[in-house]
Image (cartoon, rainbow, N blue to C red):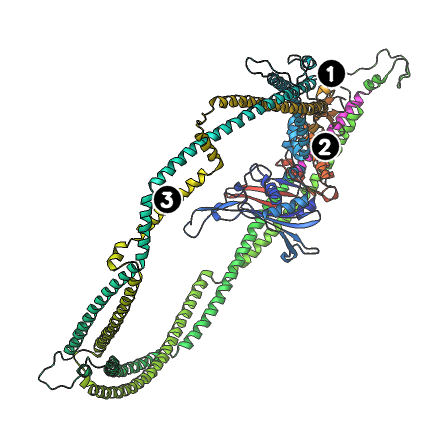
Amino acid sequence: MILHRLEFEAFMAYPDRQTIDFGDLNAAGVFLLNGPTGAGKTTILDAICYALYGGTTGDRDPAQLYSTYAARSNTPPRVFLDLTLQGRRLRINRTPVYSHPITRGKRAGQMTVKAATATVEELLPGGNPEDDKAWKPIASQVKEVNAVIAERIHLNREQFLKVVLLAQGQFAQFLKSKPVERKELLKKMFPVDHIEAMYAELLEEAKQARQDVANDEQALDGYLNRARSGMEALRESLTPLTPEGEAAEASPADGGPETAEATDTITPETVAAETLDAWLASGVEEARTASARDGWEQSRLAGEADRHAQTLNERLQLRKDWGEYEQLVARRERLVEEREPHEARVKELADARAAAPLTARYTQLRVEEQDIEEQRARQAEYAGTLKTARESLLRALRAGEDPAEDAAPYPEEELFATRTAEEPAEARGRHLDATLASLRALHKRDDQLAQEERTVRQAQTRSEQLAQKVESAAQKLETLGARAREIQENLKAYEKAEEEHALALRGAEDAEKAHREAQQAQQNIDAARRAVAEAEKEAERALGTRQKAQERWEEAARAAIEATDAFRSLQAQRLAQASSLLARELAEGEPCPVCGSAEHPNPARAREGESLVEQTDLDAAKTREDRAHEASRAREEEKEKATLAYHRASEALARARSQSETLAAQERTDPEQSARQLAQARERVQQTTTRLAERDALRKRQAQAEAEQKAAEETRSTLHDALTEAQALHRESLERRDALARELAPSKAHIPFAQRIEALENYRALAQREEQGSLLLNRAAEERSKHLVEVQGLLQESPFADSAGVIAAERTEAQILALEKAVNDYELESARVNESLGRKALVEVAARVAAGEQAPDNQQELRGRIEELRQRVQHLVRREGEREGIVRSLQALRSEFVAFRERTAERYDRVEMLGALAAAARGDTLGGYTHQVDLVSYVLGGEFERILDVADKHLQRMSDGRYGMKLSDHRAKGSRSGGGLNLNITDTWTGEPRDAASLSGGESFLASLALALGLAEVVQSNNGGIELDTLFIDEGFGTLDSETLDTVMNTIESLRENGRTIGLISHVEEMKNRIPTQIVVEKGQRGSSVRVNSY
């Protein structure tokens, strides 16, 4: 992973857009991220983490990422990251969720939530990263972007933060944490969900196996109790049943004494799991023997009950037949008594049936006579109505006229004057239709007269309207002519408008050019002044840098002199201690290297409290002297560079001041004055433009007035022609109206033609009804005469002498039906009684009655005996059913128990096997596992050991081989939890392992850094050896001395292999001096900002 560019705005402490170009930082290899506490150094890492994962390095809520400084400007938050992942160049653009106010609509001013967005683009092969067209979108949804990043980076967020961001405080805690706490962190780095699931499943299966065995033991007790209860119930069902007071009869199925002896060998108190099956088998065999015995007894009792039941049925049937015979004899005697009334009903029914046809014809004749009388009354009513209608019409025609005048008759009067009763109906109808046709023709001509009168009125109205319009058109024409003359007079004032406008435009162009020149001159002066201010700042900054370099050089020179003095002091002290050093090397019997004597009576000794200077001390001092002089020379070079930079800054300041003074001395126009002149010129242009617009408007109005004048002239001519045409139409309409009025005058009466036509049509309808009624009356009279002749013939053929006999025999339909029913009922009952008495059973009863026998009683004693036998049979059946249920239950219990015994054996083997596996997985000491390392800790211990192997190499290099790290699978002292995740610090100076808590602050930093580097490399290796070319190391450098810091920096330099970039996060002043390439975070009242310094 290589970072190229990071942009973010409105993000946490940064309200404005910040851009970090990693090009120079990657080229430097090591850079420093520094700034005051709380300025927002970690926010830069949060921005990188959010771009990749949509979350920060901590547990911050995404809704809290929006900068409170930017909320007032409504700038949306945004994070942009340009990086290379697995050889592919990507651009990630994310916007976190944030709230902003609504600016429009009814909800204006209220807050709304904007959802998070994300996009990712990939650079096309061979494409230019600066060309937006060279990027191809590959994801535009948050989930899609997360999936693309996860596929490319192969690390989750927890792993990324531990691999790319080495937070020293966390790893110091990890170094000294307890195994349980260390285990939780390792689980985040190395997923062991499947191991934990397998471990939990194994423990659960072992627990379940133990529970199954306990359940089996309880089930065994249940089987024994069920067997005891079943056998007790079976014993009760085996007792033979005998009638009270009788001895039981022997049956072929009775068992001998051997059966009882077989079942007595096992008792409910002595039965156990091993004997339960045999005991149940013996009970089943006894049940079968008892069932055979009860079956024989059941058959015997059922046979006896059936024989008694047959006898009972025969006697009861005879008793029933006897009762039926007595009832039939009584009914036969009653029928003999009703014989005479029955014969009278038969005769009455025959007379009623013979009189029925004549009765109907007499009824018909009466109805026809009544209809004829009603028709005659209606005919008289029709004649009166016709007369009334005729007289009313004639009166209405002459209403309002003077009777003395000799007027011509109307068509209706002529019709009624010629109409007589002797005239045939067909002729009367033709005359009436002709009169109606004449009236309809006159009505049509009358409508035409009314239409002509309307036409006359409309023509007169139109003539009057057109005359008024002709006069109005003449007045409008005069008004338009006056307006055209007025516009022509006004246009004379705008004859020079074009010339004035051209002059104003040229003046405005000259003024604008002069204003631009004045502005440019002022901008040059302002730029020169800013250059002077910037040069002054640069010169001041260079002066400060030179002073700091001078101070550092002086300090380094003093340190070099002090190191030389210390070396020379040690050298002189060692020379002074030469005799003591030689004496220390003397050995008894060995010659002295100075005098050659083998005896050493009084060797030289060091003064009390004085330590001897060793050669190693002298070498170390010399090394320090050399390093101090090298540092002094380096500081001297820095001083010289700073001095040269100061001189260059001073020269640049002098040039800037000279240029500023030259520009200020040049003659120029004041920009404010030129702006006022330009405004005046533009105002003059606006005025001339307005006059041109006014002139154009007048010309447009003139053209419009001329067009309106022409149109008015045409309108007046058109209206005059229309007036002449309307007057001619009015005269023609008057002539047609008068001609029609003269034509209709003789036939028009007081009432209109439509009313006269309606009255005559009503009269015709009444006349037609009167003629139709006359025809119907004649036909009804003829029909009645014919029916009367037919009835006289039928009476002569009937058994009746006259109509009085017919009326006496007449019966209603209901009476006839009642007579028929009574006759049929008597004859049917008589036939049934005779038929029933002829049955064989009743003939036998009649014979017994004739022989003097009595009817049998109800046979109560025999009924009681049958019921007793059947109850004994039912009792045997119920007991057999109960016994069969018990036997089936016992047999099922035997089958269940056999299967249960087989399962029990398998479960006991399984519980032993799972118990041993669970003990091994838990690391129980009972299983011989002395370290108590559980399965999950064992798996994580393997990864932890790999981490410690890598960390051991880094720690040895940083501690000059003194310290190392090793895994310990023993439990921590005083800990109840298992081992497997402890670590020991090895110390080659003492040869004894040390606890991490015993390390000093600087040593803890080295161990923590080594542990962090080891974790990063192992996680990177486990995820396919992904390339992570950027690494951040956070804080902790303040606890190191200068020499240890050199060692740590050398280690960090070694991490730069293969082009890796290391970012150190620190605010330690020494780190600022050591690392020239820096990302500097500055904090202010309006938020923080960043800048990249590269010296």
Q: Quadrant of residue 203?
A: top right
Task: Residue at 79% x, 21% y: name it.
Answer: 576
**Which of the labelled discs sits on residue 609, or is there none?**
1
| 492 vs 286: above or below | below
Single out the residue that lies furthest toward the left: 404
Instruction: State if disc 1 and disc 2 touch (CB < 8 Å).
Output: no
Q: Residues within 10 Å of mark 1 (few under 14, many from 20)?
A: few
Q: CA distance from mark 2 to mark 1?
A: 52 Å
Q: Which residues are magenta?
A: 552-578
Mark 1 or 3, closer to the camera:
3
Amino acid type assigned to the residue bearing label 3 in the image? Tyr
Residue 697 painted magenta: no
Tag 1: amino acid: Gly
Front one among 127 and 740: 740
Q: Secondary structure at mark 3?
A: helix
Q: Quadrant of residue 196?
A: top right
Q: Which residue is the site of mark 3?
A: 826
Query: Label 1 to label 3, Cα distance in Å?
Result: 165 Å
Quadrant of the snapshot with the C terminus = top right
Identify the residue at image location x=44%, y=75%: 502
Among the two numbered marks 2 and 3 on one chain, the one whose residue lies closer to the N terminus: 3
Residue occupied by mark 2: 943
Between marks 2 and 3, how big is the CA–CA gap? Answer: 119 Å
Instruction: Report whether residue 88 is seen.
Output: yes
Q: Nearer the viewer, residue 73 or 328?
A: 328
Which label's residue is closer to the chain start, 2 or 1? Answer: 1
How far across and down, in percent of the image, does residue 964 sit? 74, 28
Q: Nearer the viewer, residue 40 or 319?
A: 319
Q: Nearer the viewer, mark 2 or mark 3?
A: 3
Q: Position of residue 754 (x, y in %)?
A: 23, 77
